[in-house]
Amino acid sequence: MKDKRLVIYAVISVVLLLSPLFLNAYWVDVLNNVGLYTILALSLNIILGHAGLFHMGHAAFYALGAYTTAIINTTYHIPILWLLPVSGLVAGLAALVVARPIIHLRGDYLLIVTIGFVEIVRIALVNNVFGITGGSNGIFGINRPILFGWKINKPWEFFYLIWGFAAVTIFLFNRLENSRFGRALNFLREDDVAAEGSGINTAHYKLIAFVIGAFWAGMVGNIFAAKMTIIAPESFNFWESVVLFMIVLLGGRGSIRGVILGAFLVLGLPEIFRQFATARMLIFGAFMVAMMIFRTEGILPPLPRKYPIAKMLGREGSA
Amino acid sequence: MELFIQQLTNGLAVGGIYALIALGYTMVYGVLKLINFAHGDLFTIGAYLGLTLLTTLGLTNYLGPFGVVIVLALMVMGLVAIVGAALERVAYRPLRQSHRLSAVVSALGASIFFQNAVMLIYGARYKVYPHDILPRTAIHIFGLDIPLIRLLMLLTSIVMMIGLYLFIQRTKIGTAIRAAAIDQGAAKLMGINVDRVIMIVFLIGPALGGAAGLMVGLYYGQINFTMGWLYGLKAFTAAILGGIGNIPGAMVGGLLLGVIEAMGAAYISIAWKDAIAFCVLIIILIVRPTGLLGERVAEKI
Amino acid sequence: MTTLLSLKNLTKRFGGLVAVDHVNFDVEAGAIVGLIGPNGAGKTTVFNLITGNYRPDEGDVIFDNQSIKTLPTHKIVSLGIARTFQTIRLFHKLAAIENVLAGCHCRMQSGSLAAMFRTPTQRREEHQALQTALKELEFVGLQSQADQLAENLSYGNQRLLEIARALATQPRFIILDEPAGGMNNQETAALIQTIRNIRDRGITVLLIEHDMSLVMEACEQLVVIENGAKIAEGDPQAIQSDPKVIEAYLGTDEE
């Protein structure tokens, strides 16, 4: 039932919206992390979920966005939120340059290359490349964001910034999914040759999927840098990419609601069961294997797109 | 010149390790067309099992240094082979008929599982191997002191590689493995038990990987639960470099990568050592994805 | 009559094997042409060379007075050449209507930004594409199954869905690779009518088919290839009595 589903979504949204009122700062911060990973995973979902490109280097784009903001903000004191699009742009351009030569690689090869890419970026950051990344200590003293004169400082303030951004992302990505663009990504995921043979420029769409995903990851990097005020290469290592990958796979490739659920499960559950926190990755590893064997499509796979077919065929009284 | 030769021997010794691990990747890829992401962690398990057996069995009381190493190696190889076969049974066999990438994700999950299992059992800190197992002597060649253990490592890996090569080329089981790698369906029709072939591959590959883990423990003296990831990735690079699915390719690729890395560390920058291997990987995949010894295959439409 | 497609000395080698060997033939605009030959003769390879899935080693493909041998497949489609696949290549997990919308793609403009901001042009275009897609489904008689997953359609209907997807690209030239494969007699008879209807829309048809009743009934001109080389060309009656063709088929192919 569509109405029932809408009611559930509305209730969840309202509870989430009001949660800072009855949660302490610690739990609000947990929700903030869930929010950041939700947006990151949604951006990865464009590449991995919709286009089916096995990309495990998403943390690299996230890092590029965070470092762009950190470097420009600490050097030129440009306000954080002005740097939001700049961070996105830098990450998106990097994606354009990096993805072009590797876009034609087969699934598992692409996976390996993107792992190599994220490691090269991390090593470059640790080695203080161009003398601007601060080496393994990273960069500190990043400003807080100021939104319409309001300085965002406390966890609950970040909560509304992050989840506001998440809401915009969900809204826009939902539209993106239900469009010529979103369909094209699904076609090439299902069958590359048939998509190209149907007139779809598959290489172009794969590239654009990378650029959009990276652009968003870069913007999340901006907010992350402002939230932490200090960033270091270890925040962007390979395992961050693995966590994002897991969120999308467990939640459901190509499914916005699945990805959101995935972010809550992967980040939220270890907080609730703290005694198992060290075994978190062990459990997820085992879960990934079980998932592939018993439920390949994830917990909440995407719903089929709806088209007003009945209405358009109505003139003949059929269907 | 001295630096060059030191780095060359060092590179070849490490390259031998890469080659041993790469063989596991390449054999599995050959028959299943699957990148066994958990293979690097089998290598880690080999290193940790070696340490446990070494410290608990007290082999040094009964045997000389080489006897200890040989017995230890056989035990580690046997145990890791069992883990490898179990991995195949649990995580890969149920996915034999599914989409190729499902198996890749399953492999990744298995890798995460193994790595964290090792961490939970042994702890997250570095573990130290006893120093006195093998004599720390050096050999004089060309007026240089080359550590004996380095030469032994290279020698051991070459002996294992030649052994494997002969096994694959000369025995009936080896022929069956090669047949299954070319066409599983046809191999089945010729009466080859493909399930058994796959199981054998998952015994041999992990055994070699486990041996490599033990060798790293003995050579460097310390091990960590994450080491399989980096070694695994580099060994995979070696397999790609030589041409994945190609057994001599993995050997050549491993030794070559070891030398490239050692030279890069010496003459470019040690801080970028790991990045050099990844750059090699990316360049190879872009320029010649079939590797040095691989063949081109046209995609059927 | 003008020549729409012209193959000139087309050659393709796979290693030592010459899959297509200096093949020449022309397709007139508005014709229905059959490409026949024993299994493994190189027919599908010829199709793949026309559609840019393979690159020829020698020779050229001229479509509408323009060489297309170096163009990527999607460009060739937007120039007006559509195809179906011998091994059905639908998007199995997507609805029939979405499969046809894939064909509409190359006649649409709006990109990712237009989709995010849902501009009026984008909305109009989506609506039009949906209409086109439904029209093509109707054309092949599948409108009642528009929201079924492609994988749930019967084998024959999957072949028809591939034709609808190809037609949705608004081609001038359509290439059908064994369209009757897996169809029963009744479905094949309907298919012959559909192929004629396609031609009546002004679309030139080139097809590979093993079902000789379909070939003889539907095609006006036949090209026969064996071992990658053209051995005969002409109208169905002439081909049927051509000794070289009879020799090629005897004992090598069941139809």
Image (cartoon, coloured by chain):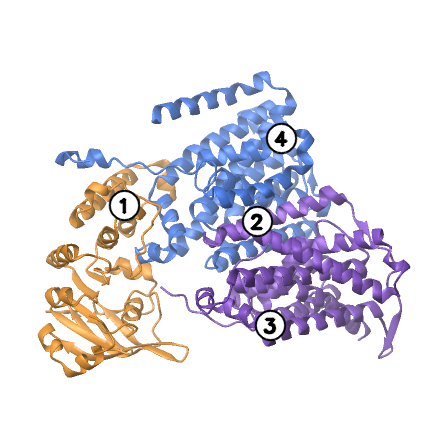
Chain colours: A blue, B purple, C orange
Callout 1: helix, strand or loop? helix
Kindly identify the residue that appears in the image at 53 percent across and 47 percent down.
A91
**CA separation in Å, label 3 and label 1:** 49 Å
Query: Can you identify the residue that label 1 sits on?
Result: C96
Q: Is residue B160 left or right of residue B241?
A: right
Query: Can you identify the residue that label 3 sits on?
Result: B168
The three-letter code of the residue at mark 3 reads Ile
The three-letter code of the residue at mark 1 reads Ala
**CA separation in Å, label 3 and label 4:** 63 Å
Q: Position of residue C172 (x, y in %)?
A: 19, 60
Q: Nearer the viewer, mark 3 or mark 4?
A: 3
Q: Tell me if label 2 and label 1 are in contact, CB under 8 Å.
A: no
Query: Can you identify the residue that label 4 sits on?
Result: A144
Q: Nearer the viewer, mark 4 or mark 1?
A: 1
Q: Looking at the image, which is closer to me, A65 or B119?
A: B119
Q: Tell me if label 2 and label 3 are in contact, CB under 8 Å.
A: no
**CA separation in Å, label 4 and label 1:** 51 Å
**CA separation in Å, label 2 and label 3:** 26 Å
Is disc 2 in the same subunit as disc 3? Answer: yes
Q: Chain of mark 3?
A: B
Callout 4: helix, strand or loop? loop
Q: Chain of mark 2?
A: B
Q: Residues within 10 Å of mark 2 (few under 14, many from 20)?
A: some
**CA separation in Å, label 4 and label 2:** 49 Å
Q: Position of residue B57 (x, y in %)?
A: 84, 53
Q: Is residue C100 visible?
A: yes
Q: Residue furthest front?
A: B191
Query: Can you identify the residue that label 2 sits on?
Result: B90
The three-letter code of the residue at mark 4 reads Arg
Q: Residues within 10 Å of mark 4 (few under 14, many from 20)?
A: many
